[in-house]
Image (cartoon, rainbow, N blue to C red):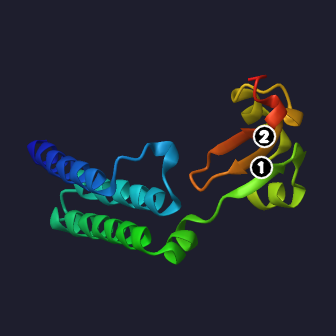
Amino acid sequence: MTTTLVRTIILYSVLLAAVRLMGKRQIGQLQAGEFVAALLISELAAIPMTDHDIPLSHGLIPLLTVTVCEVALAFCSQKSKKLRRLLDGQPIELVRDGKYITKNLEKARVTEDEIDAQIRLNGYADISQVKTVTLEQSGGMSVLPNDSAGGSK
């Protein structure tokens, strides 16, 4: 019992430091690499936390390795636009001049209903008031109004 408690505290401390090193992004804004790192880190920490037959170092070394890889990749992608586009993708325009761009909806696997909901969340009654809707790399949607819809919001 005491061993599990101590191991949990050690792994929690290392995980907390790892997450702080990786940045202050909100969960909904995680890029694909950050999400994968978060999943790996949780798995790597869980096993040595409860299995006393596995040395603590067998959890800490992979955990720290994933953290260093994520921090290094974030640093490199900050410096390289090509790497950033490869890892994060590019924004996809889903609506242009109040009309759905069907091929981009299919590519992004987004429905018209999801776009309509986002338009309403941004204070517009319907797609005719919107110039563009863009699916950003973070997974959020940016909604820009038509010039004539500016006062309707």
Depth check: 107 or 40 in front?
107
Q: Position of residue 150 (x, y in %)?
A: 76, 29
Which residue is labeled 2 in the image?
Answer: 115
Kindly state the secondary structure of the residue where label 1 is placed. Answer: loop
The amino acid type, in three-letter code, at marker 2 is: Ile
Circle 1 or circle 2, nearest the eye: 2
Does 21 appear above or below 24? below
Q: Position of residue 6 (x, y in %)?
A: 11, 46
CA gap, disc 1 and disc 2: 8 Å
Image-quadrant location for residue 61: bottom left
Which residue is labeled 1 in the image?
Answer: 110
Question: Taking the image as drawn, is residue 109 in sight?
Answer: no
Q: Position of residue 81 (x, y in %)?
A: 51, 73
138 lies left or right of 112: left
How many marks can you see? 2
Depth check: 121 or 56 in front?
121
**Mark 1 surroundings: few (<14), some (14-19) or many (≥20) residues within 10 A:** some
Question: At 87% from the left edge and 46% from the top edge, which residue is drawn?
Answer: 97
Q: Quadrant of the N terminus?
A: top left
The amino acid type, in three-letter code, at marker 1 is: Val
Q: Quadrant of the C terminus?
A: top right
Image-quadrant location for residue 117: top right
Kindly state the secondary structure of the residue where label 2 is placed. Answer: helix
Question: At 56% from the left edge and 73% from the top edge, which residue is drawn?
Answer: 86
Determine which of the numbered discs, if any, sits on residue 100 in the image: none
Depth check: 48 or 136 in front?
136
56 lies left or right of 20: left
Does 116 appear above or below 53? above
Question: At 57% from the left edge and 70% from the top edge, which residue is drawn?
Answer: 85
Mark 1–mark 2 CB contact (< 8 Å): yes
